Image (cartoon, rainbow, N blue to C red):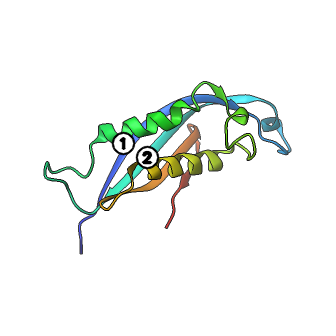
Amino acid sequence: MPAKYTLKVISDFASAHTLRDYPGACSRMHGHNWKVEAEVEASQLDNVGMAIDFKAIRRQVRELTGVLDHRYLNEIKPFDKINPTAENIAAFIFSGLSAALNDKRIRVKAITLWETERACVRYEEE
């Protein structure tokens, strides 16, 4: 069975949003201190013995979440058109991180986005 390495970095950002057409309090503007767990997978190591440097993953996650940090998400593409739900934000981060990191050895495995300490969504693609 081939080896598989899964690396994880954790980052965070704060933002506000409004859930359009939601039948409850979340239809009003409110904010969250989001926590992002980014998992990257590799089946082989480089000549240094790493799959990818944790710093490289963290830098890309921070770049992606930097456009969301301390912002009203409903004013930022694509959330000006789609609801800025935890699910859609996780997919947005996954897509951006995949575009930045995926290559022959590395692929983004999953994004887990924590909206609160007790509620999160995990997004991954097959």
Image location of residue 60, percent across then percent down = 42, 39
Q: Residue furthest bottom?
A: 1
Mark 1 packing: few (<14 Cα in 10 Å), some, or many (20+)?
many
Quarter where residue 83 is shown: top right
Image location of residue 14, percent across then percent down = 58, 28
Q: Is residue 58 left or right of residue 115?
A: left
106 is higher (above) or lower (below) than 26:
below
Mark 2 packing: few (<14 Cα in 10 Å), some, or many (20+)?
many
Do the residues bearing badges 2 and 1 touch, measured as CB atoms within 8 Å?
yes
Split into 4 quadrants, where in the image is the N terminus?
bottom left
Q: Residue at x 51, y 47 (%)?
A: 96
Q: Which residue is mark 1?
A: 57
Image location of residue 54, percent across then percent down = 30, 41
Q: Which element carries disc 2, helix, strand or loop?
A: strand
Quarter where residue 115 is shown: top right
Image location of residue 81, percent across then percent down = 75, 45
Give how far apart the Cα atoms at labels 2 and 1 are.
Answer: 8 Å
Q: Is residue 43 left or right of residue 103?
A: left
Q: Nearer the viewer, mark 2 or mark 1?
A: 1
Which amino acid does the dot numbered 2 rest on? Answer: Ala
Q: Which mark is residue 94?
A: none
Q: Residue at x 32, y 62 (%)?
A: 104
Pick whichever, 28 or 62, lies toward us: 62
Pick whichever, 73 or 99, lies toward us: 99
Q: Residue at x 63, y 29 (%)?
A: 15
Q: Which residue is mark 2?
A: 38
Q: Residue furthest top?
A: 70
Which amino acid does the dot numbered 1 rest on? Answer: Ile
Q: Residue at x 82, y 37 (%)?
A: 27
Q: Which element carries disc 1, helix, strand or loop?
A: helix
